[in-house]
Structures are given as structure tokens and as C-alpha cells.
Amino acid sequence: MNVDVTAGAVAVVGGGVIGLSVAWRLAESGYRVVLVDPAPRSGGSWVAGGMLAPVTESWPGEEEVLALGSASLARWPDFAERLRAAGGDPGLRTEGTLAVALDSADAETLAVLADHLRELGREVERLSGRQLRALEPGLGSRVRSGLHVPGDLAVDTRETLRALHAAAAGAGVEFVTVAARSVGPNVVELADESTVECAVVVITAGAWSGGLHPGLAGLVRPVKGEILRLRARPGALPVPTRTIRAHVESRPVYLVPRESGELVLGATQHEVGFDTEVTAASVLDLLRDAQQVLPGIGEYALTETAAGLRAGSPDNLPIIGVLEPGVLVATGHHRNGLLLAPVTAEAVLSILRAEELPAAVRAADPSRLRGVPALPSPAGGPR
Ligand code: GLY
């Protein structure tokens, strides 16, 4: 595809972290950009924890996800710097991540991850419970072992989204706050029966992408994540310095500290269609597991419960590339939307300019999914 900046507008459909990053990057590069979303910077991105964690998210068999995540993480410091100058501070935290285990089965899970990373030439440091508590004194006495991963970072999700929205507006992106109903070459059909005519469409609608274009039907599915926000009250133990990830009786949980004293505690993972209600059982599970890791949170204020929808793909890699002439896609980022925003925005720009893509991005091309059996579509439609 070679889309000259004079060819007409680029319509970006979906205003989460991926859509806003794409829109900003294209507008900065001279394209006229129209972003279509009834409520930009809401949805799954608004709820997300903000971990930039390709290593602690990795697992044997998902080497391409790790390669793409690492390529994007390497771009984050520059992305954050440019965002600070253009829209606001995304709150990039560089203190790193601890992955900890409470029982022997949890420790075995971490040992599998450490061995896998060593085979890939990535060293992670194994630490005892005592060594972990020396780094993070708030860790509970049941934490028995873990890994220190200094390169897995975090951002403040909501500050990032505010900054991206401001940067995109500042670069000239026009916002159309109406839901998209469907997408075809050179056109976006809107829920109010109007249309956006354009030179090219980029689908960045996360979990809702599957309902917008037949080429994505059944390939992108909503994966519900419930997440809590807490705040250290006066007299309570301060929030940890690093992101803490844990397996508690095989259930994953993470705690992401914010500069402000907020602690983001996530997240469940349920395949229940477009349901975004938080259940009492999920809140119980998250709090009980997190309190075993960081007992002091019992004294914290519980300030928010929320649920968001990740955009799952069949192989956990995103779907980035050309669906048909005039229609690009950048969706299916599943657990890694914040992490993958910089590399995705660069990739979309490169595709429009007919530039060669790095191998890690080529692995995410939609053509790999041809012939993958489509899932039945879950209840709920495009927003
Ligand atoms: N990135 C963590 C999650 O999706 O819960």
C-alpha cells in the first residue's frame, strides 16, 4: 500500500490506546486523520493496569509475542519523551517487576518461565523470599521465591490516554464521536446512518473489531478483565516500588503502583462475551490473593472496581496489516495494548508508506489467520 498524504483522510476506527497512538503518529507525519469513536480513551484501555511487561507475560510457545513486545518496549522511552512534549506525561516507571510465588506449584510455574527465558538468552535473576523482602519490605511471609525482572516497566494508563488524546488533537486529528457500524474500503458506516469517506480505514476497535469487517469475524473475541484500584491511606504501608506479579495457588495476580499512592490490582480473565459487570466473587478472589502477597493492603482504601474487555486473537499475537485494499487493521492486542502501542503505530505508518516491516511485526500479519476456524460471535455488537 502506498498512501500519499494528499490522497485523502485516514479514518481510524477506535479510540483506545492503539487507535489514539496510530492517529497521533499518522497526523504527526502529515496525514489528515479522522478518529471515529463514541467515547475516545474509554473501553479496555481506560481500565488496564499499564504493565509494559513482555518478559513476565511470556510463555513457551509464544516467542513471537515476546519478540514483538520487546521491540515495542525498546521504543517506549522515546515514545514517552515525545508524548511528554506533545500531550502530557504518561508516568513511565522504570523500577522494574518482581514475579513471586507462594507455594511450590507457583514456584514451579516461575521456574518454567525462567528456564524458557534462559533458553532464549534472557537472564532473569532468581531470588529467595528473604531477598525479595529486602527489595520490597511489604511482601508477606508466605512469599517464598521469585524472579527480578528490572526491564519490565509500567505506565500510568489514564495519564497515557489523556496525553495521547491531547497529542492527537494537537497534531490535528479530527474526532467523530459516533459509533461505527461497519467498515469497507474508503468508507466507515456510522450508527447514525452517516458515513466517513476516506482514502484508507484503520480498524483499531479492540474487542469490537470483529463486528466491523467480515475479514475479522470470529477472529477477535472479548476477554473480560476485572481490576481494582486501591489507595494507601495515612498510616498504612506505602505502595511497593516495583510492579509485583504473583501466582497464588496457580491464580495470577498483579499489583501496579502509581506515583500518586494508588495501587492497581488485577486482573481476572473470563471469556463471557461483552459482559462488563464486576462480580462480587472476582473482587473477593483478587483481594484475597493480593493480600497474601502484600498483607498491608487490608488497610488500603478500595477506590474503584471496573471491568474491561481485552481483544483476544487466536494465537495471542495482535493482527496488524492489510485486510483488503483500503482497509488496514491493528487489533487483537489482548493483554498487551499499552505495551504494543508504539510498535503498532510505527507499523501502520510504515504500511501506508509501503516501507518494509520488521520481522517481529510481519509475524502479526492477518494472512496467518486465513483458514483459522471462526468462533461463534458473542452477544453484543459493534459500539
Ligand atoms: N496486561 C495484563 C492484563 O491484561 O490483565
Image (spheres, rainbow, N blue to C red):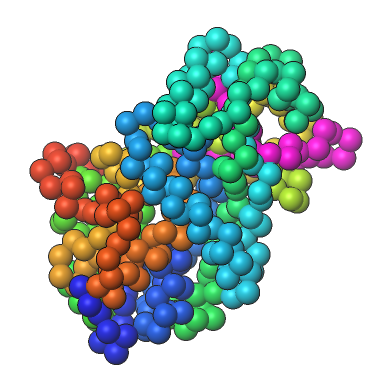
- The magenta stretch is 225-250
Give yes or no for residue 294 being in the magenta stretch: no
Query: Residue 155, image x and y in percent?
Result: 60, 52
Q: Is residue 301 visible?
A: no
Query: Residue 180, image x and y in percent?
Result: 30, 66
Left or right of 278? Residue 320 is left
Q: Residue at x 40, y 75 (%)?
A: 26
- In the current view of this chain or complex, which residue is farthest to the front? 121
Q: In which quadrant is the C terminus drawn?
A: bottom left
- In the current view of this chain or complex, which residue is farthest to the right? 235
User: Please, is residue 372 above or below residue 288 in the view?
Assistant: below
Q: 16 or 95: which is nearer to us?
A: 95
Q: Quadrant of residue 183?
A: bottom left
Left or right of 12? Residue 242 is right
Q: Residue at x 70, y 18 (%)?
A: 129
User: Please, is residue 189 above or below residue 116 in the view?
Assistant: below
- In the current view of this chain or complex, which residue is farthest to the bottom? 6
Q: Is residue 328 visible?
A: yes
Query: Residue 373, image x and y in percent?
Result: 13, 39
Q: Residue at x 15, y 70 (%)?
A: 325
Q: Residue at x 28, y 70 (%)?
A: 355
Q: 193 or 196: which is nearer to us?
A: 196
